Image (tube, grey):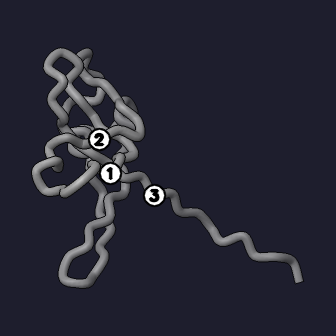
Amino acid sequence: MASKEIDVNYLISKNNQIKCQSISVNEVFGVEADSQDIFFAFETAHTPFAKYVVGSLPRTDIVIQNIRTGQCLTGLEIKFAGPYDMPSV
């Protein structure tokens, strides 16, 4: 989607309301999507949150890291939504 400059839907929860807005893939990743320094770590710890957790750090769906420095750029929880599969009547 980034190479075709197609924005993605981004859900934001604020003041008990959910808003859907479009943002670029680069904004989601926190780095240029075609960067040679990008690394996708799946189901791993998003270490910047460690200071807020007592006990073990929960896994994050995707952690985007700088491959050269190991720095966590973004942690993403992915939620897929599709049409409800209604049984035939």
Which residue does the image show at 17% across and 49% down from the upper left? 49
70 over 51 or under it: above or below: above
Q: Which mark is residue 11?
A: none
Q: Nearer the viewer, residue 47 or 78?
A: 47
Element under disc 3: loop
Q: Position of residue 45 (x, y in %)?
A: 29, 41
Element under disc 1: loop
Which residue does the image show at 14% across and 44% down from the upper left? 48
Q: Position of residue 1 (x, y in %)?
A: 41, 37
Which residue does the image show at 18% across and 15% down from the upper left? 68
Which residue does the image show at 63% across and 68% down from the upper left? 83
Q: Which residue is mark 3?
A: 79
Q: Which residue is mark 1?
A: 58
Q: Position of residue 26 (x, y in %)?
A: 24, 38
Q: Position of residue 27 (x, y in %)?
A: 21, 44
User: Does the CB distance between marks 1 and 3 fall below 8 Å?
Assistant: no
13 over 76 or under it: above or below: below
Q: Mark 2 Cα within 10 Å, few/some/many (few <14, many 20+)?
A: some
Q: What is the distance, in whole Å, between disc 2 and disc 3 at their CAs? A: 18 Å
Element under disc 2: strand
Name the amino acid, label 1. Answer: Pro
Q: Quadrant of residue 36?
A: top left
Image position of 50 (left or right of 1): left
Q: Nearer the viewer, residue 34 or 42?
A: 42
Name the amino acid, label 2. Answer: Ala
Which of the two discs, 1 and 2, labels the residue nearer the N terminus?
2
17 over 41 or under it: above or below: below
> Which mark is nearer the camera, 2 or 3?
2
Q: Which residue is mark 2?
A: 45
User: Does the CB distance between marks 1 and 2 fall below 8 Å?
Assistant: yes
Q: What is the distance, in whole Å, between disc 1 and disc 3 at their CAs? A: 17 Å
